[in-house]
Amino acid sequence: MKKIATIILLLTTSIITSQEVRLVNFEVSSCEEERHIEKEILSRKQVNDTLVIKIAILRNCCDKVSQSISFKKDADGQNILNLEYEHYSSNPCMCLCYKEYEYTIEGLVDTDYLVYINDEEVEQ
């Protein structure tokens, strides 16, 4: 009986702590002059379960981008919000520019999480 109670408790805890987060909007700024920024969080505003977070990156001027997000726990149980993007281009340019990516994410009930960009922790 104790084993069954323990299993139910574990399942209930994992269901309660899991969050169904989804990317509802993604915006890319126009290409601006090159700045010495690799990856940086510019702003972060959370209202209820919606987060709007803006990051800055340095990329090839002609890149196109595909984006996604993931929300998971690391080995220590810390919540991780990973902002993911992948660049692709059939004709890369010979220039770099500064771009801002703005992610609008819904479903973030728990506000205790670290933000990663492409699986790398960034300063909060």
Image: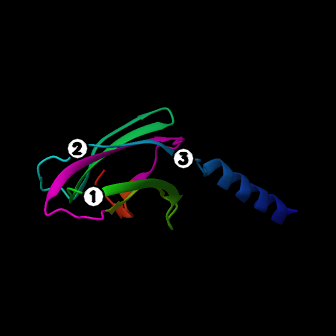
> Does dot 1 land on a helix, a strand or a loop?
loop
Upstream in the sequence, badge 2 or badge 3?
A: 3
Residue 16: percent from left, percent from top:
65, 48
Element at label 2: loop
Does 62 appear above or below 30? below
Q: Residue at x 51, y 36 (%)?
A: 49
Of helix, strand and loop, which one carries label 3? loop
Horizontal side, residue 21 vs residue 41: left or right: right
Q: Which x, y percent locates residue 66?
A: 40, 56
Three-letter code for the amino acid on which mark 2 is drawn: Ser
Residue 38 shows up from this direction:
yes
**33 or 54, which is in the foreground?**
33
Residue that mark 3 sits on: 21
How many angstroms separate mark 1 from mark 2 (CA)? 11 Å
Magenta residue span: 89-114
Asked whether, in this view, residue 7 is left or right of residue 29, the answer is: right
Q: Quadrant of residue 97?
A: bottom left
Name which residue type carries label 3: Val
Residue at the location (33% across, 63% down)?
Answer: 88
Residue at the spot 22% in from the left edge and 64% down from the top edge:
92
Tell me the distance, in whole angstroms, between the alpha carbons under discs 1 and 3.
Answer: 27 Å
- Label 2: how many residues lie within 10 Å, few (<14), some (14-19) or many (20+)? few
In the depicted structure, whether residue 15 falls above or below residue 3: above
Q: Which residue of the protein is positioned furthest toward the bottom in this rendering? A: 75
Judging by the rendered image, the residue that carries numbered circle 2 is: 30
The Cα–Cα distance between marks 2 and 3, rounded to whole angstroms, is 27 Å
Number of other residues with Cα within 10 Å of mark 3, as a class: few under 14, some 14 to 19, many 20 or more: some
Q: Which mark is residue 63?
A: 1
The answer to whether one can see residue 82 in this image is no
Residue 113 is one of the magenta-drawn residues = yes
Residue visible at 52% across and 46% down in the picture: 22
> Can you tell which of label 1 and label 3 is closer to the viewer?
1
